[in-house]
Amino acid sequence: MKTELSLALIGGGNMANALASGLIGRRCAAADVHVIDPGEAVRERWAGQGTTTAAAPDARLAECRVWFFAVKPQIMAEVVRQCRPWLRPDTLVISIAAGIPGEAIARWLGTDAGPYARIVRCMPNTPALIASGMTGMAALEGVDEADRALAEELLRAVGEVIWVRDDADIDAVTAVSGSGPAYVFLFLEALIAAGVEQGLTPDQARRLALGTFHGATQLASLSPDSPSVLRERVTSKGGTTAAALAVFQERGLTDIMRQAVAAAARRAGELAREFSS
């Protein structure tokens, strides 16, 4: 195991649990993880894993090199301000709170001398719960290369990561990958239902749809060719695939996707303004 890391998980829900599962024993000892959560049952579960726990922010935070905020955006401002008394100059703050800009967190943690800028804002997605997530990351100006490397290492415990230029780009990340699993699930629902309409059993349709999505995404990930080239290769002129794709094109699937992603990004911006005011 590398040099042990002291980590505070502020919010002990599913995403925090996924992160800890990938780190405890590899990057840190359970005893070096401090979990803050108001839920007694949540704290008991964490204590059973060997971590320390607290119902509210406490002095143990001052011993933690990294603070990982995983709380609901509605309470983020209050929780961050409660943690501020134990902030050290070298504390790396990582947030996965949806809709909360990094500059807002910097302001809540700041003092009369100015905002605290050693902050990385992240947007993971639900496949992170099985260590197959995709996380977009943005660093504020106070984050140095060592902090970036550490933040990336931590988030790689739940999947792949990508850095974007700045905090504002997280709205686009949210619209594409943060909300993206729901788009996939919706398409799966529709494909399964269509298969049943064509005479397959629900189980057969589900297995075929899931297997197709898994195989196609794996192929797209491993192939040097673009999705459009892969699509063209499987589409024979006058064939069955061409007939299906013609319907998608007639109904404007590409435009629908653009509108959907734009709506998600727009809503992400609205939430950011709402929660950071």
Image (cartoon, rainbow, N blue to C red):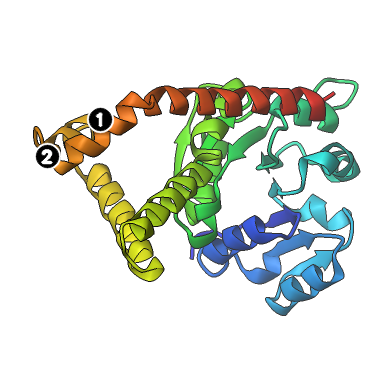
Residue 162 picture quarter: top left
Could you tell me which quadrant the C terminus lies in?
Answer: top right
User: In the image, what residue occupies the spot 57% across and 34% down?
Assistant: 174
**Does the image show residue 116?**
no
38 vs 188, nearest the viewer: 188
Q: Is residue 23 left or right of residue 32?
A: left
Q: Are marks 2 and 1 in contact (CB under 8 Å)?
A: no
Q: Which amino acid does label 1 sit on?
A: Ala
SS at mark 2 in the image: loop
Q: Label 2: how many residues lie within 10 Å, few (<14), some (14-19) or many (20+)? A: few
| Residue 166, horizontal then vertical, whole percent | 57, 22
| Residue 14, horizontal then vertical, whole percent | 65, 60
**Residue 246 tag number:** 1
89 vs 237, nearest the viewer: 237
18 vs 6, nearest the viewer: 18
Disc 2 target residue:
239
| Residue 184, horizontal then vertical, whole percent | 44, 46
Q: In this view, does 246 lie to the left or right of 11?
A: left
125 versus 271 height, above or below:
below
Q: Is residue 96 left or right of residue 229?
A: right
SS at mark 1 in the image: helix
User: In the image, what residue occupies the spot 61% across and 30% down?
Assistant: 143
User: In the image, what residue occupies the spot 64% across and 63% down?
Assistant: 17
Q: In the image as oriented, which residue stretches furthest toward the bottom?
A: 48
**Does the image show residue 269?**
yes
Q: Label 1: how many residues lie within 10 Å, few (<14), some (14-19) or many (20+)? A: few
23 versus 249 height, above or below:
below
Q: Which of marks 2 and 1 is nearer the N terminus?
A: 2
